[in-house]
Image (cartoon, rainbow, N blue to C red):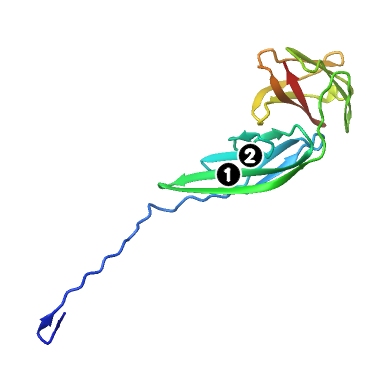
Amino acid sequence: NELNGQNCTDTWCDTVVVLGGTGPECNAEFQFNALEQNADSVHFSPSQTDANHYSWHFGDGSTSDHHDPWHLYAEPGTYVACLTVTNELNGQNCTDTWCDTVVVSTVVEATEGIAQLSQVGTLYVWPQPFEDELHLSGGVIALVERAQLFDQVGRLLDDRPARATSGQLILNYASLPPGMYVLRLRGASIDRSIRLVKR
């Protein structure tokens, strides 16, 4: 600029950030529901299904990084379950955490010599704990079409057709390591889960 024969110069700088497209979204809200017959077996489902990472904390010291895990609570009580989702898109990251209260009213265990009652009849499971073969009998056995075995964080380990012979169903899980599992018996008119211990 020039005024009365005098000149002046001024310079101003600022930062311009050009983002590489739309950033990621993070929504950690989730829903959960328990099996009607077994309130201790809870299925968790996140609202967001396209996150890069899921970190579940079930409030009893157990965790999972699965997308939509099943969790088996060992004791009745009130638990605060939390989900943290992490996402990345176009070089940008986001994280969100959501917590909710889970109330577990009852816990059903398979115990040797004790009948497991359900809406459709009686189920006997033995031995408990088991080593290789698991024996099941009772009024519900004729309704069973599939047997699914899950670990404690909800991973499906075994899924097989299951039909009772002479009123008894025998399942062999000799290849599994010792631990706690959930056996889910399914059919057109039955959906029943039982907690098992293998030694």
| Kind of residue sitting beneath label 1 | Thr
In the picture as drawn, the residue positioned furthest to the bottom comes out as 4
Q: Which mark is residue 54?
A: none
| Residue 28 shows in the view | no
Q: Image point 74% across, 23% down: which residue?
A: 147
Q: Which mark is residue 84?
A: 1
Distance from Cα at disc 2 to Cα at disc 1: 9 Å
Q: Are marks 2 and 1 in contact (CB under 8 Å)?
A: yes
Q: Which residue is mark 2?
A: 57
Q: Quadrant of the N terminus?
A: bottom left
Q: Measuring from the top left, give residue 64's x and y in whole percent.
A: 61, 34
> For the residue labelled by badge 1, is the local secondary structure a helix, a strand or a loop?
strand
Q: In the image, is 97 to the left or to the right of 143?
A: left
Q: Image point 58% across, 46% down: which residue?
A: 48
Q: Image point 65% across, 34% down: which residue?
A: 62
Crowding at mark 2 (Cα within 10 Å: few <14, some 14-19, many 20+): some
| Kind of residue sitting beneath label 2 | His
Q: Measuring from the top left, give residue 78's x and y in whole percent.
A: 76, 43
